[in-house]
Amino acid sequence: MDISRDKLEKISDWWEGKNKGRPLFMKVLPNPSPAEDKPVRIDWEREIRDSDLDSYVRNASRFNSLYLGESYPVYHHTWGQRGTPMTMSSYLGGRVVFRDNTVWIDPVVDKWEGFRIRFDRKNRWVDVSRRLMDKQLELSAGRYPVSLPDLGDALTCMSMLRGTGQMLFDVVEKPGLVLEKVKEFTDAWKEAHDYFHSMYRGSLEGDCSWLMWAPGRTYACQCDFSTMISPSLFEKFVVFELEQLKDYLGYIIWHLDGYEEVRHLDILLGLRYIKAFQVVPGAGNPPCASETWLPVIKRITDAGKSVYVYASTPPEVETLSKELPPERLFIDGGIPGSTIEETGSFVKRLWG
């Protein structure tokens, strides 16, 4: 891949909490003469031609920017203008609805009894993902990572298939049945991950989730549904799901999305196989460098986990750098400079 060996080694060390020197950071300087092509739109709900995919991927992936620090170009898995989350709900038979900026799933499950959760390679949306990745891999020619689809998690995908309200009743009234379906889901999930990972395994080093690269099989695990359940239910269902994945995935990072999920943090910190946490404060909330989030992030690093955090300003970068151990710290954003020289000057002043 056209990512320097130094970057790959530094990211690999970060996963293990063994990074040396300055923290990792993301900084992309845009091409000073960007292409003037308009974004290519595809009617994803209709039959897609190869020429459509070719134009879409070429336009969406112009890798002529400058990737500083540990940033790198990557082919993202998107249907439309925004990321496509929870694709397993599509692969399992959910009705896909395209909106202006995202993709939604209309429920299809009236009751779990009789509904079999399985990965069907002939599913229309599996085919869409495979064809998209085929085109990305063709244009990448082994130079850049291609990310896996954002497969999603059991409870969130199941709530999309069932309806959120009904799913909340299910976890309370039919916990045994829900656990059976979670097990079916994780079996299907691993088959889906392996199916897509096998498309580039051997030609691209490591693996790449919707969030980031790792030297082995990886995923940014998550559970949006967890904001609506207690820690005891989280342990019953979500930890059960993670236990099914722990031996399959070598590099798990947990997507901690908003402060409402912090109530589950102690449970997650006790899982040795989670190597890192991505901390997302959420729109309109205090940043990672705030008094709200820093104690939370320190709990994570004190537990021996690495962190992927966000900054918007140079002072936030400086605070994160001062308060958190560099061997476990990955900062996305906040690094100033519109040229290599300006960015380099800040990095040298802060980290030497």
Image (cartoon, helix red, strand yellow):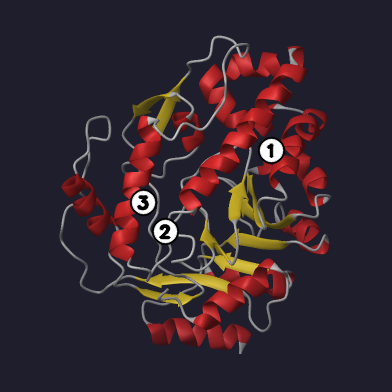
Answer with the quarter of the image where residue 95 lies. top left
Disc 3 to disc 2: CB gap under 8 Å? yes
Element class at badge 2: loop
Classify mark 3: residues with Cα within 10 Å, few (<14), some (14-19) or many (20+). many
Classify mark 1: residues with Cα within 10 Å, few (<14), some (14-19) or many (20+). few
Q: CA distance from mark 1 to mark 3?
A: 34 Å
Element class at badge 3: helix
Residue name at image x 71 percent, y 69 percent: 16
Q: Amino acid at mark 3?
A: Met
Q: Which mark is residue 260?
A: 1
Q: Amino acid at mark 2?
A: Val
Residue 289 percent location from the top left of the image? 65, 61
Specify whether 80 is left or right of 276.
Answer: left
**Front one among 201 and 276:** 201
Disc 1 to disc 3: CB gap under 8 Å? no
Q: Which mark is residue 133?
A: 3
Residue 199 percent location from the top left of the image? 43, 54
Residue 233 percent location from the top left of the image? 78, 28
Answer with the quarter of the image where residue 180 lies. top right
Q: CA distance from mark 3 to mark 2?
A: 7 Å
Camera sees residue 262: no
Element class at badge 1: helix
Residue bearing the label numbered 2: 146
The answer to whether residue 3 is above or below residue 91 is below
Q: CA distance from mark 2 to mark 1?
A: 32 Å
Residue name at image x 58 percent, y 25 percent: 158
Residue 330 percent location from the top left of the image? 61, 67
Q: Amino acid at mark 1?
A: Glu
Camera sees residue 236: yes
